[in-house]
Image (cartoon, rainbow, N blue to C red):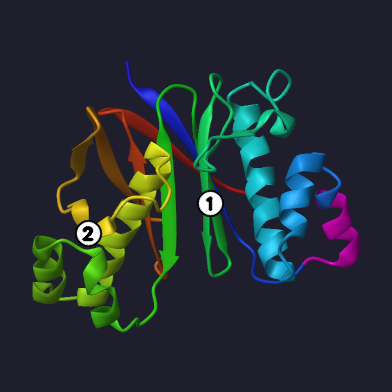
Amino acid sequence: MKQTAIIYFKLEEQLWEEENYQSAFSEMPEAIARRIENYTDLMDRQLRIRGKLLLKEILKDFLLDHSVGLEHIRYSATNRPNLYPDVDFSTAHSGHLVICGGLTKGRIGIDTEKIATPELKAFESFFSPGEWRQINNSDDPVKEFYILWTRKEALFKATGSGILGNFSELDVRDTRISLGGTTYYFTRLFIHPDFITHLATDLPELTIVLKTI
């Protein structure tokens, strides 16, 4: 039976009014509020608050909002957040886009990047030789760079290894990869034409429900 991943996203194109910010911030548990206050940029704070609000919507959809809430978020030794065993989740933001995905069974990682024009040569050390050839031989090297990069980031979020591993040691040209005895599967999410987004899960079959608010 296929599991369902619920994905919420939102474009935060402008800063909230102070009253709206304080109202949303008041919904954050104390531990999360302290983390948010570590950021000095107002948009950074807003995106992180929005990510948690999207998670609350996911919990409602899974009918877990009463038994499991933001106050139950715990962090692993590698700073990976989770609500185990009830739901696994992952958030990401780039530019003004914030996205959050959740599963009730399995592991999930998500990453999104706004397409820019990076100096690709500076990132060569993050890719395997085969990946680097694929990027440079592509009809659109920048797009190919972001496809592989978001797969790597989503994978690290799903595994919980953070940035402790070496990006170049993981070849993500295929849509699946075996790591530590577990196979992870990549799915591209078409959220917005200006962004490349990927999902990584340990589930071979998955129904994806994509929502915005």
Q: Which residues are magenta?
A: 16-24
* Image point (52%, 36%), residue name: 89
- Quarter of image, res 116: bottom left
162 left or right of 152 in image = right
Q: Is residue 117 above or below residue 11?
A: below
- Quarter of image, res 29: top right
Q: Is 23 included in the stretch rendered in magenta?
A: yes
Say which of 213 and 167 sits in front: 167
Check disc 2 and report its element: helix, strand or loop.
helix
Residue 74: horizontal and vertical position, in percent?
Answer: 62, 32
70 left or right of 178 in image = right
- Looking at the rendered structure, the kind of residue marked 1 is Ile
Q: Residues within 10 Å of mark 1 (few under 14, many from 20)?
A: many
Q: Is residue 60 above or below residue 47?
A: above
The residue that mark 2 highlights is 168
Q: Residues within 10 Å of mark 2 (few under 14, many from 20)?
A: some
Q: Is residue 90 above or below residue 121?
A: above
Query: Hey, which residue is sitting farthest right in the picture?
Result: 19
Residue 71: horizontal and vertical position, in percent?
Answer: 74, 31
The residue that mark 1 highlights is 99
Residue 54: horizontal and vertical position, in percent?
Answer: 63, 44
- Looking at the rendered structure, the kind of residue marked 2 is Ser
Q: Is 59 included in the stretch rendered in magenta?
A: no
Circle nearer the N terminus (2, 1): 1
Query: Hey, which residue is sitting farthest top in the picture?
Result: 1
* Image point (81%, 50%), residue name: 24
* Image point (71%, 64%), residue name: 39
From mark 2 to mark 1, how far is it between C-alphas? 26 Å
Check disc 1 and report its element: helix, strand or loop.
strand
Residue 26: horizontal and vertical position, in percent?
Answer: 86, 46
